[in-house]
Amino acid sequence: MDGTLLVGRSSFPYFALVAFEVGGIFRLLFLVLSSPLAGLLYYFISESAGIRVLIFVTFAGMKVSDIESVARAVLPKFYSTDLHPETWRVFSSCGKRCVLTANPRIMVEPFLKEYLGADLVIGTEISMHKGRATGFVNKPGILVGENKAVALKKAFGSTSAPDIGLGDRKTDFPFMNLCKESYIVRPEPDVKPLSQDKLPKPIVFHDGRLVQKPSPLMALMIILWIPIGFLLSCLRIAAGSLLPMPLVYYAFWALGVRVKVKGNPPPPAQKSTGQTGVLFICSHRTLLDPIFLSTALGRPIPAVTYSLSRLSEIISPIKTVRLSRDRVTDANMIKKLLEEGDLVICPEGTTCREPFLLRFSALFAELTDELVPVAMSNKMSMFHGTTARGWKGMDPFYFFMNPSPAYEVTFLNKLPYDLTCRAGKSSHDVANYIQRTIAATLSYECTNFTRKDKYSALAGNDGTVTTKPGLAAKKVMGC
């Protein structure tokens, strides 16, 4: 797989992703420290021995369900950005597609079958005990050399053989000799991976904290940066939470957080004239969207949200109100909040990292005609500020742990009267129009995916953040 179907010839980055996402920073550190030994064994002694070291250091003691979760939700995005264009051209033209790889099957199978249409994936099988990986592999061991040839014979039988075999190194020759035609994929430093728009299935949803593929050097930089980044993140969060909102923009700038504001935002609602507040309709990139909207306006704007961790509520510099998911209750609550002033809502109901907009809930269009679309976009170089599988309370910390995170807030024109529900438009027409307007501004693509689609694909749930019941009166908690 590495060097053949993928441009990169090293599987270390993908083991590093599993190590960090499941085992955390210390597991990643252990893997980085072990990588020189793995490289020495791989290149000078035994390819199989080098891979065994990576598997043991990465997997030993991990829950198999956690490994499967990362393979399904995290790895496909990184694999898809490294597809070899020529190999894919041949692979995609075949009727039945089989992948033989020395990588653990548990890591690569979800991507190969779901996104590349592979019919059969044969890889190294990891050993398990009571739902956890032991760090060892099952017989016949690592699929290299003759082991690949034996696995191919077992899969196809002695009477048939694959029409085309592709490989990239000498240890692939045994299985390639069994194919009717065989081709070597030579390493070409200048070859560019397949562009994302040519993938048979776009990757709309993906999870994981790391933005870049962690090579050994990048993994080491991440490990060294995390302690510094966490302290910097706490300082940035404290500045946003404790300073008056008109000063937050300048504090962020001084602390390396860039906020770019475009468009002409409306003035605050005047209660004395009976004017109701404006409802800002935002695209949703992270849970910090309402905070950066408030930063751009220089005044705190309350936000309604479907789910938010208790920690995020505590450190938030703006008022946050949970939606109950009951249509009548939520409508009455939003109307009451608009009577008090401006309000922000993200009708997608969840975040999306890729250049797509999820389906907009139409409830907001029925409640007011004072609608201002806002296109939100951000840039992160090291960590993602969202998660579907992890603890959402760490989302703002990870975003602010980036060396120089950036947000761009674009205020669009207020929705004209003739496009509102009061003018006879349906709420769905209004929601779809605003979705298309924001998508056109950001050069994104509109979809019909929903919050449930995302969390079902990535985490196997509906994305609800449950809150623990409060302590009874006169109860004291010690720590």
Image (cartoon, helix red, strand yellow):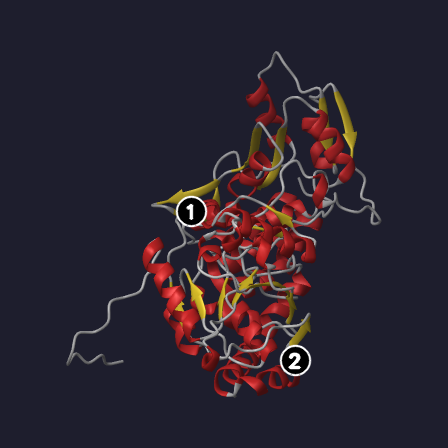
Q: Which residue is mark 2?
A: 256
Dot 2: few (<14), some (14–19), or many (≥20) neighbours within 10 Å? some
Q: Can you give x and y, in whole percent of width and height, for residue 27 in the image?
A: 50, 62
Question: Residue 116 appears at what percent x and percent y?
Answer: 63, 35
Between the residue at mark 1 and the residue at mark 2, the CA separation in whole angstroms equals 40 Å
Whichever of labels 1 and 2 marks the residue nearer the N terminus, that label is 1
Closest to the observer: 143 or 313? 313
What amino acid is at disc 1?
Answer: Val
Relative to residue 354, is residue 334 depicted above or below? below
Say which residue label 1 marks.
64
Q: Position of residue 37 (x, y in %)?
A: 62, 58
Which label is found at residue 297? none
Tally of numbered tags:
2
Helix, strand or loop at label 2? It is loop
In x, y percent, where is residue 221? 64, 69
Q: Residue furthest left?
A: 474
Pick the residue in front: 178 or 200: 200
